Image (cartoon, rainbow, N blue to C red):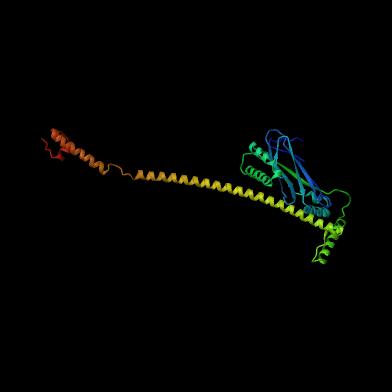
């Protein structure tokens, strides 16, 4: 069924579910694997960035888990189920059958978005040198992680999410024989234990080992390798989580500093306005002493001039002022 996808959406194959075939084989290539293809349909000339997430980061090893896809090209993602979890799933199958595996809640999420031309140019230029420098590979990973942190926390860049279910299947090659299948490994383990207990002070060389002992040794090393891989995947996931938390904390701190500066500016402005208003209110109403003295001196000069000009008699017409000046009414 054709799905209307936005221009920034990658085409994911398979479209609905990832299937892992659980076999009882052991060895380097016995771990269940699954491939997923991400294709840029080329609706625009932009590079599309992708990031693959899972609900069980300790169970699956995803390589690569992020990157860029050029227009019209595709990227193949390899997903491996670690041996420890494969054994757990097989034990559940031996107890309850396929119905136990059908209840799996494991899921994968493929996120994609458009990458800026500047970032894509720098990324592809650095990627061409990745084979000659491990430092460059780390810088590429950090650059992608930083970009996704920016996109995931309040950016306006649209993100397309594609969810995939996970199915675990055991091939039907006949009735399962868990006891018989476990017997060689158990006997080899017992032989290795007895060999270790009987030779506390010396370790047998590879030339002196029997085939069963070599098989047990290789199995033990393979198990330790798978546990180390799972541990490294867990550390990568925790590193991404800590990076996200650190970036969020930095953004919160910057917002707090900006808000505090704004509050300080507003407080200083209101304080200045308050002082100006208080000064205006503190000024007394009416005339000041200086103004009164100036007016009195002016009147004095006017009186002297009037006396010299003989025009003082005009003041007799004013009843109150004439009386105050001592003029007698005629």
Q: Measured from the top left, where is residue 59 in percent x and y?
A: 75, 51
Q: Which residue ends up furthest to the left in the rendered image? A: 330
Q: Measured from the top left, where is residue 190 in percent x and y?
A: 84, 62
Q: Residue at x 87, y 59 (%)?
A: 210
Can residue 241 be seen here? The reply is yes
Q: Using the image as rendered, state which of residue 109 and residue 274 is in the foreground.
A: 109
* Position of residue 166 in the picture relative to residue 329 (left or right): right
Q: Quadrant of residue 47?
A: top right
Q: Residue at x 69, y 50 (%)?
A: 236
The quadrant of the picture occupied by the C terminus is top left
The quadrant of the picture occupied by the N terminus is top right
* Position of residue 294 in the picture relative to residue 223 (left or right): left
* Position of residue 129 in the picture relative to residue 24 (left or right): left
Q: Measured from the top left, where is residue 140 in percent x and y?
A: 67, 44
Q: Using the image as rendered, state which of residue 38 and residue 267 is in the foreground.
A: 38
Q: How many marks?
A: 0
Can residue 51 be seen here? The reply is no
Q: Using the image as rendered, state which of residue 173 and residue 101 is in the foreground.
A: 173
Q: Using the image as rendered, state which of residue 235 and residue 313 is in the foreground.
A: 235
Q: Is residue 171 above or below residue 45?
A: below
Q: Measured from the top left, where is residue 53 in percent x and y?
A: 71, 46
């Amino acid at each position: 069924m054709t799905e209307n996808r936005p221009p920034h959406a990658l085409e994911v194959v398979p479209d609905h579910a990832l299937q892992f075939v659980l076999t009882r084989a052991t060895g380097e290539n016995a771990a269940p694997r699954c491939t997923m293809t991400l294709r840029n349909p080329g609706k625009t000339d932009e590079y599309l960035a992708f990031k693959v997430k899972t609900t069980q980061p300790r169970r699956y090893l995803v390589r690569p888990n992020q990157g860029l896809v050029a227009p019209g090209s595709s990227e193949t993602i390899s997903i491996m189920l670690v041996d420890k979890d494969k054994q757990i799933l097989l034990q559940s199958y031996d107890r309850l059958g396929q119905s136990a595996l059908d209840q799996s809640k494991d899921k994968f999420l493929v996120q994609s978005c458009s990458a800026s031309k500047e970032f894509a140019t720098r990324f592809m230029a650095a990627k061409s040198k990745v084979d000659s420098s491990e430092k460059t590979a780390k810088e590429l990973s950090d650059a992608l992680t930083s970009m996704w942190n920016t996109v995931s926390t309040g950016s306006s860049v649209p993100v397309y999410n594609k969810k995939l279910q996970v199915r675990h299947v055991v091939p039907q090659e006949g009735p399962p024989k868990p006891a018989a299948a476990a017997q060689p490994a158990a006997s080899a383990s017992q032989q290795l234990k007895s060999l270790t207990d009987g030779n506390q002070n010396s370790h047998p060389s590879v030339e002196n080992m029997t085939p069963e002992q070599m098989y047990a040794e290789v199995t033990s090393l393979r198990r330790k390798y798978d546990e180390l891989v799972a541990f490294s995947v867990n550390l990568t996931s925790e590193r991404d989580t800590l990076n996200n938390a650190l970036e969020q904390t930095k953004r919160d701190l910057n917002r707090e500093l900006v808000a505090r500066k704004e509050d300080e500016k507003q407080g200083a402005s209101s304080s200045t306005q308050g002082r100006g208003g208080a000064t205006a209110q503190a000024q007394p109403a009416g005339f000041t002493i200086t103004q009164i003295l100036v007016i009195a001196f002016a009147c004095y000069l006017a009186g002297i001039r009037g006396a010299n000009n003989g025009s003082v008699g005009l003041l007799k017409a004013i009843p109150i002022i004439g009386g105050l000046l001592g003029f007698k009414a005629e």
